[in-house]
Image (tube, rainbow, N blue to C red):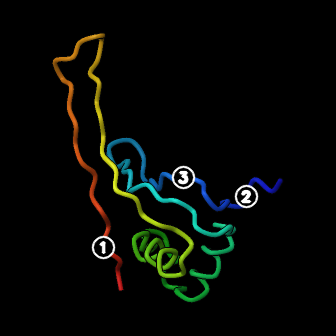
Amino acid sequence: MDTKIARSGMLLCVDSGEYSNYLVTGFFVVLRDFDPRAELDTYLNEHPDQCERYGFEKDQFLSKLLEKGLLLEIEYGTLYLGQSNSNEEFNFTPGQIIAPVN
């Protein structure tokens, strides 16, 4: 099995950044098998200006995958169960749905 293929039915967590800039963009279901790296390469060939450092428009790329029918965004939330066996910080936060960038 090719592990570099996003398989139909798979749940994807799309994230980016690191440390204080880490961000979970959302959760998506793969609708059709695809090679994410090949999709990125195709996208960057169409948008060579985004190959520059700090030039990659992540939301625009993700919108392209949605437009192609490769992914379906699902509504999600975060359920924080607290820390150190204490429920004092228990919290539910709904996620945000990303509007496609045109």
* Mark 1 to mark 3 CA distance (whole Å): 19 Å
Mark 2 / mark 3, whichever is N-terminal: 2
Name the secondary structure under disc 2.
loop
Look at 71% across and 61% down and name the residue there: 5
Look at label 3 and name its amino acid. Answer: Leu
Front residue of 38/96: it is 96
List the residue tagged with mark 3. 11
Look at label 2 and name its amino acid. Answer: Lys
Look at label 1 and name its amino acid. Answer: Ala
**Where is residue 13 shown, x and y percent of the image?**
48, 51
Q: Is residue 88 left or right of residue 25?
A: left
Q: Find the residue positioned furthest to the top.
A: 85
Front residue of 102/78: it is 78
Look at 53% across and 77% down and name the residue there: 69
Look at 32% across and 43% down and name the residue there: 20
Q: Quadrant of residue 101?
A: bottom left
**Where is residue 67 shown, x and y percent of the image?**
48, 81
> Height in image: 28 above or below 31?
above
Name the secondary structure under disc 3.
strand
Q: Find the residue positioned furthest to the left.
A: 88
**Mark 1 or 3: the one toward you:** 3
> Height in image: 87 above or below 57?
above
> Height in image: 67 above or below 19?
below
**Where is residue 28 shown, x and y percent of the image?**
47, 59
Q: Residues within 10 Å of mark 1 (few under 14, many from 20)?
A: few
**Where is residue 75 shown, x and y percent of the image?**
34, 56
Q: Find the residue positioned furthest to the right.
A: 1
Number of marks drawn: 3
Mark 2 / mark 1, whichever is N-terminal: 2
Q: Residues within 10 Å of mark 2 (few under 14, many from 20)?
A: few
List the residue tagged with mark 2. 4
What is the number of the mark on residue 99? 1
